[in-house]
Amino acid sequence: MTDTTLTITNCTAIPLQRVPSLPVNTFRETLLELVNQQQRRVSAFFAMPGADTGQGLELIAVLANDNDHTCDLTRTTIQDEFASLTPECPTFAWFERELAEQYSIAITGHPWLKPIRFQPPMIDGAADPANPPKTIIAGDTDYFTMDGEGTHEVAVGPVHASVIEPGHFRFQCLGEDVYSLEISLGYQHRGVEKMLLGGPDRRTLPMIATVSGDSTIASTTAYAQLCECLAPSLKPSPDALLLRGIAAELERLANHVGDLGALAGDVAYLPTASFCGRLRGEFLNMTAEICGNRFGRNLVRPGGVKFALTPAKAEKIFRWLDQVSKDVDNALNLMFEAATVLDRFENIGPVSKTAALDIGLVGPAARAAGLDCDIRFSHPYACYADTAPARSEASGGDTLARALIRRREITASTKWLKEQLALWKKDNQTTPAATALPALAPDSIAVSLVEAWRGEMCHVAVTDAQGAFRRYKIVDPSFHNWFGLALSMRGEQISHFPICNKSFNLSYCGHDL
Amino acid sequence: MLKVFKARLQQGYQTGKFPPAPPNLPDRFLGRPAIDMAKCRADCELCQQVCPTKAIIPADGDKGKKALSIDMGRCLFCGECAAACPTKAITFDPTDFHLSTFCREGLIDPQKRGEPPQELQELCGLSLVIRQVSAGGCAACELDFNVLNTLAWDLSRFGISVTASPRHADCLLVTGPVTRNMLIGLEKTYSAMPRPKWVIACGACAISGGIYQDSSECLGGVGDIIKPDLYIPGCPPHPATILQGILHLMGKHIPKDADTQSKS
């Protein structure tokens, strides 16, 4: 710990008072120094109203230190203005757009300050009949433009061609080549963070489960960990922690297999596309075998898990997985041996290691660019401190690398799951968590990081004097990565967009909250 | 090419037997909810206190006795009410996935399920083209609708297909609580569809706003904007529930087996 930051480990709660509150200039210098010089990653950077009215806004930063397995926390108080860090450190770009939108902060000097979710401010302002709030129309903002002979603009969405969530894409093209892609989101904004204020209550857990419905295990685990460190009497048993890990790896497998199938489909390699569509469902059904729901709803809860994985069920899933993993290998071997597929993936949509680092890319997309970031290893939680799938690596940062890292993670997670299920058959018995939630520690801040299948997911809770949520911040991996997709398209043919998009497969609702 | 044939042989025939055989549902699946008023104490209200979506509502009981109903249009099928009930009066039938109805009231009272629109059966009984719009959906409803297009469910064998253009669509399938930011997109898609056209509300969010029913950023589902012709409850609905609902809409009703039929 230094005098400018407080260093904590993942899944820790501390009184908010212990986080140094710096003068704004020192706060800015500290963030720039830590991120630019000392390889910290910005896990969260958010605002909340001061504890008493008229106290301005508090800005809180959570910086992950991947080498040291810790997080640095720092904060400051501002009135309604903050000088942008983005020109010196681009990873802050989207965080600052969010600050401006959620709390009407004037971010001076931001190079491209525009709405991020098209949401009304988090604080309900006093009604001013003379100045009614401007009607918000999603997507109605400035975009990059390009002039000259042969240039043209392609606008896509919000409603897309297939069964997928809405978002708006603007391509500036010269002939077939894309000069720039801008991604404008917010169509899925449901007001999650606003509704979580004052919680936890009976709505909190199911709402957290639907932040991004394909990452329910990751998201509910992040929430459960926050509650557990804010209320130490909620102590999950080791086998409950292991079951969270098992469910998380099943979630990773389902989505990675589905993504590779979708990639195959986009380059018209139909055998793997067809096989993987079915195989993805097998992993969802294994999850449903544990908790009754294909997406893992109702499984993870503060204090542990709701359902026991009986040895008989573990045995059943073990055999099932054994069979399914053979079919997965078969389907994926076919695809990765096909020259027509590799030719379409190789050198398409590259994101360099430097660019990935600069914009704060996370998850498989970052690992594909050669970055060494995986919360399961850098900030271990649940069972991952004791046992975890082998680390997977890739390099190159192109679509092929993003496909290969998934392939390797599928192999690693399958092997690990088989080992854990084989052990489970003999002796583990999950103890279901109690239903009642005790009071949370008052005036505290807690940080919980998990490695969702898309990458780092960060939940931060700040409690008030009664222990209720004064602020609940969710940073979905997609929040970090959407700009990576935009970068990957620079200089690409516009016809490569579908496979670049699938190779990231980002969440709209997780970003939009 | 030979490798592809060999792989196809290894993968085998994987399309499920539903319908007509029942789908493989896990033993912990939460299907149709029911309250046994003979067991219910009716005064403890514990189920209502734990329900995240206010899905347990007062109903007309016999001879003025207080009674409760479960509104499947709001229900997340989380099972918290069943766990909280001291007299075990609330159950979720793990085999009954036939949950869809043709009117909103049917989600509260199974007797009022309604009938599929006659005109749709006459015009689209053999083929139905669907345009899907996600209006704040969390991706779970979208994914479990999409999964019907995989070889495990093989949607096209029923004449059902998904289209990109609303001009080619008979039917609009809406997911999500309808966010303010998607209202224009939803309305434009609907108005771009030729008449006659029908609407499916898929999932608790699209039916009632679900867990987002109190959000100032959402509009409480599709019902106040466009009246749905088919309601598919669940959070998310199981693929079998979605398929059974759409088939019933087309007039291809799959009867439940005798056991579940006698219960409902």
Image: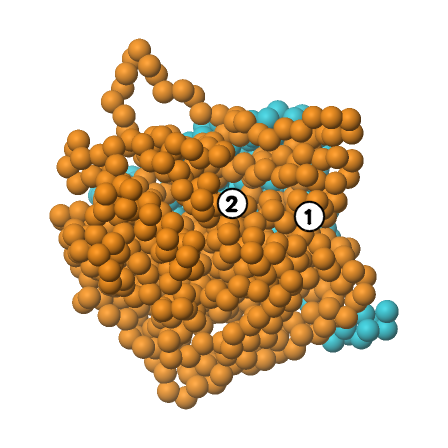
Chain colours: A orange, B cyan
Q: Residue at x 64, y 38 (%)?
A: A180
> Which numbered disc, 1 or 2, marks the residue that appears first in the sequence?
1
- For the residue pair A368 and B22, the one nearer the viewer reads as A368
Vertical arrangement, residue A429 with respect to residue A150, above or below = below
Q: Residue at x 34, y 80 (%)?
A: A429
- For the residue pair B227 and A226, the one nearer the viewer reads as A226
Q: Is residue A398 visible?
A: yes
Q: Residue at x 14, y 48 (%)?
A: A466
Where's the N terminus of chain B, which quadrant?
A: bottom right
Residue ID for mark 2: A508
Vertical arrangement, residue A269 with respect to residue B253, above or below = below
Q: Quadrant of residue A447?
A: bottom left
Gap in angstroms between the C-alphas marked 1 and 2: 16 Å
Callouts 1 and 2 close, C-beta under 8 Å? no
| Chain containing the residue with disc 2 | A
| Chain containing the residue with disc 1 | A
Give the x, y percent position of residue B58: 27, 41
Element at label 2: helix
Give the x, y percent position of residue A327: 67, 74
- Is A455 left, or right, of B126 in this rendering? left
Residue sticking out furthest to the top? A130
Q: Are marks 1 and 2 on the same chain?
A: yes
Residue ID for mark 1: A498
Give the x, y percent position of residue A488: 63, 49
Give the x, y percent position of residue A371: 53, 63
Q: Residue at x 69, y 30 (%)?
A: A153
- For the residue pair A110 and A152, the one nearer the viewer reads as A110
Amino acid type, callout 1: Pro
Vertical arrangement, residue B57 with respect to residue A222, above or below = above
